[in-house]
Image (tube, rainbow, N blue to C red):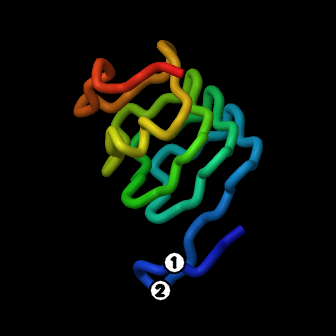
Amino acid sequence: MLAKSKHSGGPRLDIHGAFVRRANLSGASLRSAILDGADATNALFKDADFAEASMKGTILRGADLSGAKNLTIDQLSLAVIDASTILPGYIDRSRLISK
């Protein structure tokens, strides 16, 4: 589903609550996307752009976020990650609380 973005005036991805396990979203623009509550267990997000994406309760267990752009500790602190979640090199895992 696409919703109008409040930031750019263009459409933004809205997959809140969706089941996207093992989906390949590598290289995707997730700018201002609404990912709240989505189950993205074991999904691929290599080189995806997460600028201003909403990630409250997004399940990222086993997800590959290597090379992700504009992903912040604040976003990840609202998501559900585990030891098998692959984070981009600029994210310090020790600053996150495992859920």
Q: Pointer 2: residues within 10 angstroms few (<14), some, or many (20+)?
A: few
Is 4 placed above or below 35 here?
below
Is 36 placed above or below 40 here?
below
Q: Is residue 34 left or right of residue 69?
A: right
SS assignment at label 1? loop
- Is residue 29 in view from this perspective? no
For the N terminus, the image quarter is bottom right
Residue at the (36%, 26%) spot, across then down: 96
SS assignment at label 2? loop
Residue 7 at x, y = what percent?
A: 41, 78
- Is residue 43 in view from this perspective? yes
Dot 1 and dot 2 residues touching (CB under 8 Å) = yes
Q: Which residue is mark 1?
A: 5
Is 39 placed above or below 87 here?
below
For the residue marked with disc 2, what is the amino acid? Gly
For the residue marked with disc 1, what is the amino acid? Ser
For the C terminus, the image quarter is top right
Residue at the (49%, 29%) spot, across then down: 64
Q: Which mark is residue 26?
A: none
77 and 26: which is toward the camera? 77
Q: Which mark is residue 9?
A: 2
